[in-house]
Amino acid sequence: MGGALRKSREILLRCYHDQAFVFADVTVCYVDRGAPGNESCAPGERIYALDSQYMEIGEGHEASPVPYHRITRILYRNKVLWERGMKKAKAQE
């Protein structure tokens, strides 16, 4: 506590494993150089894996790794759960 930062991977793992969440209702926005505004967002149903260093996003047989350090915010049903630089206490509200 006391100003500690929560990690984006922790939030995603909780959303994936906690039955209080529907992972398909999660949206992850991340730095995507070359995309409009250099940012893209992916809904939970497009996230195939949450590995130790990155998540895999894709459709069909094509998946792309996105390192966790590129995540800018995580939303659940359009409400911000986590945003880069957000304090842990704020993220739990």
Image (spheres, rainbow, N blue to C red):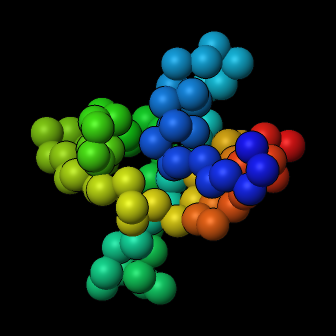
For residue 68, which quarter of the picture?
Answer: bottom left
Percent of width and height locating residue 2: 78, 50
For the residue pair 47 and 10, the one nearer the viewer reads as: 10
Percent of width and height locating residue 28: 51, 53
Residue at the location (30% across, 84% down)? 34
Instruction: Give the vertical position of 51 relative to 29 (above or below).
Output: above
Residue at the location (20% across, 53% down)? 64
For residue 59, which quarter of the picture?
Answer: top left
Percent of width and height locating residue 20: 70, 18
Residue at the location (20% across, 39% down)? 60
For residue 86, which quarter of the picture?
Answer: bottom right
84 left or right of 4 in image: left
- Would residue 91 be visible to someone looking at this image? no
Residue at the location (53% across, 48% down)? 7
61 left or right of 76 in image: left
Instruction: Give the vertical position of 3 relative to 23 (above or below).
Output: below
Instruction: Give the vertical position of 33 relative to 64 (above or below).
Output: below
For the residue pair 24 and 87, the one nearer the viewer reads as: 87
